[in-house]
Amino acid sequence: MADAVNALTLQFLEWVASDRRTHADVMETWRSSCPRLPIWEDAVLAGLVRYDGASRAVELTRSGKALLARNAASGIPAKQAAD
């Protein structure tokens, strides 16, 4: 279960890093049937992403970038890690 959550977190971080993302983009794309958005909340609480209210952009933190770099070094794309 933890591996699936980690894979989903990595997919989310890759998605954020791939283009300029707004808070609205995140809420629309990563919404779930739950009233709150667990992947977003988990990434924020873990210090992997931050929201810049001035630019309305969601960005990776240093920790988020480091996690992606470690995953890239493993050679396994996050989408495959989820399978």
Image (cartoon, helix red, strand yellow):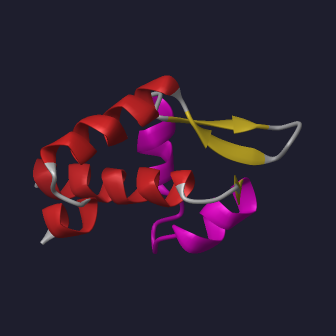
Judge whether residue 26 is colored magenta: yes
* Residue range highlighted in magenta: 23-45
Please state which of residues 32 and 20 is positioned toward the viewer in this rendering. 20
Tell me what residue is drawn at x 23 percent, y 49 percent: 6
The quadrant of the picture occupied by the N terminus is: bottom left
Residue 62 locus on image (x, y percent): 49, 25
Please state which of residues 44 and 59 is positioned toward the viewer in this rendering. 59
Judge whether residue 46 is colored magenta: no
Residue 55 locus on image (x, y percent): 86, 42
Please state which of residues 55 and 18 is positioned toward the viewer in this rendering. 18
Q: Is residue 34 above or below residue 12?
A: below
Residue 37 locus on image (x, y percent): 50, 57
Exactly how many numbered labels are in the figure?
0
Position of 52 compared to 4: left or right? Answer: right
Q: Is residue 24 above or below residue 57?
A: below
Position of 3 compared to 66: left or right? Answer: left
Tell me what residue is drawn at x 81 percent, y 47 percent: 56
Q: Is residue 29 above or below residue 1?
A: below
Tell me what residue is drawn at x 53 percent, y 63 percent: 35
Tell me what residue is drawn at x 55 percent, y 54 percent: 16
Please state which of residues 56 and 78 is positioned toward the viewer in this rendering. 78
Position of 78 compared to 46: left or right? Answer: left
In this view of the protein, can residue 46 be seen by the observer?
A: no
Magenta stretch mostly in which secondary structure? helix
Which residue is the extreme one toward the right?
Answer: 54
Q: Quadrant of residue 65?
A: top left
The quadrant of the picture occupied by the C terminus is: bottom left
Q: Quadrant of residue 70?
A: top left
In this view of the protein, can residue 64 be seen by the observer?
A: yes
Residue 73 locus on image (x, y percent): 20, 41
